[in-house]
Amino acid sequence: QVQLVQSGSELKKPGASVKVSCKASGYTFTSYAMNWVRQAPGQGLEWMGWINTNTGNPTYAQGFTGRFVFSLDTSVSTAYLQISSLKAEDTAVYYCAKGITMVRVNWFDPWGQGTLVTVSS
Amino acid sequence: DIVMTQSPDSLAVSLGERATINCKSSQSVLYSSNNKNYLAWYQQKPGQPPKLLTYWASIRESEVPDRISGSGSGTDFTLTISSLQAEDVAVYYCQQYYSTPPTFGQGTKVEIK
């Protein structure tokens, strides 16, 4: 079955960097977009952007440029989210979510289990 | 960006009773060329990722029980749970994918009365 498995929780100090992984299985990784969604504690869902898993071209939503980088390792069907210069307000659960096509953003299915990133001194 | 507004923020319903969640978009998400509404619904249980329930406003994802249904068009949409079960306790989100960025409603928490 189609499955996305993310890396485990991270506790980081302000100013540090973190890299979250999302390993896909059960489908052809390079045929579907991979999206990233943030959920701050007790809050709703915020789309961060997506990466074309065929070309590696990322698209970032407003508010997620500069410190956020999407990347891939297609040899192991894995997408990555790297956040640099971490701030307390980056504390959130980060989800990867498979897109339906590579042509446009549609609905997301399935989602990874989420990775909690906590930024605290 | 299209703003999605859900109502109510929370509701408590007795087991076996109907739960109705509304979602309103700040502009129409109906694409006239294909007559499709670019709207999805998700269910998120505590400690779990969101799970897709419906897309194109009313197409139920496989394995979603038929007591859960989506309806509506244009700017006004509804998710209905016809007979609430204990396993339906969750937060429900609508999401538009008519335009980028895709945006979500703030969520509606469904509890047992």
Image (cartoon, coloured by chain):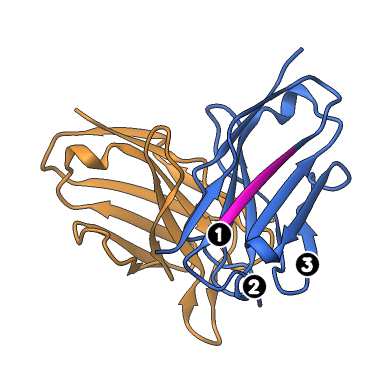
- Region in magenta: A19-23
Q: Is residue A16 left or right of residue A79?
A: right
Query: Which chain is home to disc 1?
Result: A
SS label for mark 1: strand
The x, y position of residue A91, in whole percent, is 67, 27
Q: Which residue is mark 1?
A: A24
The x, y position of residue A36, in whole percent, is 65, 51
Mark toward the start of the polypeptide (2 vs 1): 1
Q: Which residue is mark 3?
A: A56
Chain B: its colour in the image is orange
Query: Which chain is home to disc 3?
Result: A
Chain A: its colour in the image is blue
Q: Viewer-proximal residue, A100 or B97?
A: A100
Whether residue A30 is in magenta: the answer is no
SS label for mark 3: loop
Mark 1 crowdedness (10 Å alpha carbons): few <14, some 14-19, many ≥20: many
